[in-house]
Image (spheres, helix red, strand yellow):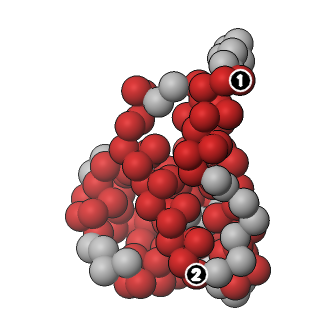
């Protein structure tokens, strides 16, 4: 897959509008989380410039949250249950990621491992590194 060309002027305008920077406060983190969610919601409609901004914002959020909210080593299904609890989610809320209730139940209860593809999707959903699910 060839890399999409970035229009420097369009990307520069996005950067000027959003002013992404190393996150130092919870308020800055919340602002960039909201921006990341807006970009996620655009899905396939994101421009190459928005994809680049999303990648930058995601890295800034991950760096902040890894420093301020370290997740202790735990089995992936326990990490998932913890994140679900913190976000008031039910197993049915994960159906778009896993596709079936049985699969979600098996993963949440530790009966089935989380694939790399699912770990990536969960990482995006919860704004954490996919590695916590592997």
Q: Is residue 63 left or right of residue 32?
A: right
Q: Secondary structure at mark 1?
A: helix
Residue at which label 2 appears:
26
Sequence-first tag of 2 and 1: 1
Residue 102 seen anywhere in this rendered image of the structure: no
Q: Is residue 23 left or right of residue 78?
A: right
Residue 1, how many percent across, how many down?
67, 14
Q: Residue at x 30, y 74 (%)?
A: 89
Residue 129, how many percent across, how many down?
66, 62
Q: Is residue 3 left or right of residue 28?
A: right
Residue 94 seen anywhere in this rendered image of the structure: yes
Q: Residue at x 29, y 54 (%)?
A: 95
Q: Which mark is residue 96?
A: none
Q: Residue at x 56, y 46 (%)?
A: 17
Which label sits in the foreground, 2 or 1?
1
Q: How many marks?
A: 2
User: As rendered, which of 74 and 67 lies closer to the eye?
Assistant: 67
Label 1 Cα neighbours within 10 Å, binned few <14 / some 14-19 / many ≥20: few
Residue at which label 1 appears:
8
Q: Is residue 46 above or below residue 129?
A: above
Spatial CA distance of label 2 from label 1 is 30 Å
Q: Is residue 54 left or right of residue 12?
A: left
Hey, which quadrant is residue 14 in on the image?
top right
Q: Is residue 124 above or below residue 42?
A: below
Labels 2 and 1 touching (C-beta < 8 A): no
Residue 104, how many percent across, how many down?
35, 62
Placement of the C terminus among the 4 image quadrants: bottom right
Residue 6, how many percent across, how many down?
68, 21
């Amino acid at each position: 897959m060839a890399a999409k060309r970035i229009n420097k002027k369009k990307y520069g305008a996005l950067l000027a509008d959003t002013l992404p920077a190393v996150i130092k406060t919870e308020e800055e983190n919340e602002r960039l989380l909201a921006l990341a969610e807006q970009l996620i919601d655009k899905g396939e409609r994101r421009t190459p410039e928005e994809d680049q901004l999303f990648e930058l914002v995601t890295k800034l959020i991950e760096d902040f949250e890894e420093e301020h909210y370290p997740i202790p080593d735990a089995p992936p299904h326990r990490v998932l249950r913890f994140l679900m609890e913190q976000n008031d989610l039910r197993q049915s809320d994960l159906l778009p990621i896993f596709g079936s209730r049985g699969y979600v139940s098996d993963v949440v209860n530790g009966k089935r491992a989380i694939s790399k593809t699912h770990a990536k999707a969960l990482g995006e959903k919860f704004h954490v590194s996919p590695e916590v699910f592997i």
